[in-house]
Amino acid sequence: MPATPAIAVTGLRKAFGDHVVLDGLDLTVPEGTIFALLGPNGAGKTTTVDILSTLTRADGGEVRVAGHDLARDPGGVRSAIALTGQFSAVDTLLTGAENLRLMGDLQHLGRQETRRRAADLLDRFDLVEAADRVPATYSGGMRRRLDLAMGLMGDPRVVFLDEPTTGLDPRSRRAMWDAVRGLVSDGVTILLTTQYLDEADQLADRIGVLDSGHLVAEGTADELKRLVPGGHVRLQFDDAPSLAEAARVLGVPTPDAASLALEVPGDGSVAELRSLLGRLDDARIDVAGLTVHTPDLDDVFLALTGRPTPEEVPS
């Protein structure tokens, strides 16, 4: 019997006045995975997170989060989730440890359990040495890690991360990535929105592209890249006769002979490479070098939405 998905969305609709933001969104996220939601500004990414985390009421559709029906049991949803928004929500007048203990008190965890969880999270997010300092002295990455740790005090099963690394330097971004991977290894489910396509490529088990209120594509990063033409294998040769013979055998145009290289269209799969090299080997043609070029997520995004990579503006 298949496992119940951590997030199941069917026909989700939301409009603000005459402006339709979500127009029948369907989405399924299996337990213990990372799902990245991409889309141009205004596509509805943040609205989706706000609805799933009970901050905004949907106009229609059915949603279940961690087994709880969003419309009938919003309290059950809230008890099972954590949300880290686009901007840090830490209290700058309290120390890092006090911020965590405050969350424990709000969740009625009890003093002993609160201190135990706070100590564990400070250690997990490399904040032990900063625990007795106020967040005003933290770097941006440290504040984001503390923000995430605060959401985890309630031991959530599903975590929503709405552009969690916006504005962070590369080192801090990678530290957040490591923290997210650690959560998933513990069985937590992550729904991530991001404006950084490399972030989705690095983290997500599956990626959905949202445009005009619909999910226009969904799959692994590799599956999405294969949707876009332009992939090719570049073959390098030592001399012009080998180049010309390879072009004849493979049925591709011969470029400027000075380059001594051919570009053969393809997706770069192992099976395709094996077949390509086998044909050249049968013809006794030696290949001096080989490189595989595949479209990246920027190409996918542009092809699917007709727009370039999202700007750094909240959707």
Image (cartoon, grey):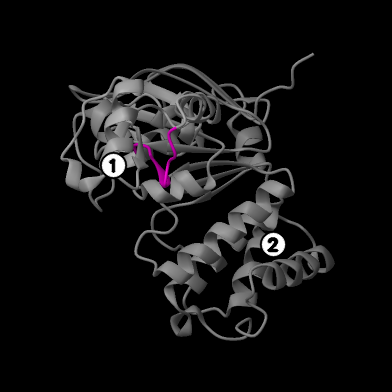
Question: Is any part of residue 178 visible from this angle?
Answer: yes
Q: Secondary structure at mark 2?
A: helix
Image spot of residue 71 (x, y percent): 54, 22
For the residues labelled 2 and 1, the Cα–Cα distance comes to 63 Å
Image spot of residue 159 (x, y percent): 58, 45
**Front-most of residues 224 and 204:** 224
Q: Residues within 10 Å of mark 1 (few under 14, many from 20)?
A: many
- N-terminal-most mark, 2 or 1: 2
Q: Amino acid at mark 1?
A: Ala
Is 182 left, or right, of 288 in this rendering? right
Asked if the stretch drawn in magenta spans residue 28, the answer is no
Q: Quadrant of the C terminus?
A: top left
Whether residue 296 is situated above or below residue 306 in the rendered picture = below
Judging by the rendered image, the residue that carries numbered circle 1 is 261
Whether residue 305 is situated above or below residue 311 in the rendered picture = above
Residue drawn at point x = 82 percent, y = 63 percent: 113
Disc marking residue 104: 2
Residue drawn at point x = 26 percent, y = 31 percent: 244
Query: Quick one: which residue is furthest to the right in this view?
Result: 112
Q: Quadrant of residue 240?
A: top left
Whether residue 153 is situated above or below residue 35 in the rendered picture = below
Is 48 left, or right, of 155 in this rendering? left
Range of magenta residues: 285-295
Q: Nearer the viewer, mark 2 or mark 1?
A: 1
* Number of disc labels: 2
Asked if the stretch drawn in magenta spans residue 290, the answer is yes
Q: Amino acid at mark 2?
A: Gly
Is 54 left, or right, of 239 in this rendering? right
Q: Is the residue under label 1 in contact with that under label 2 (CB below 8 Å)?
A: no
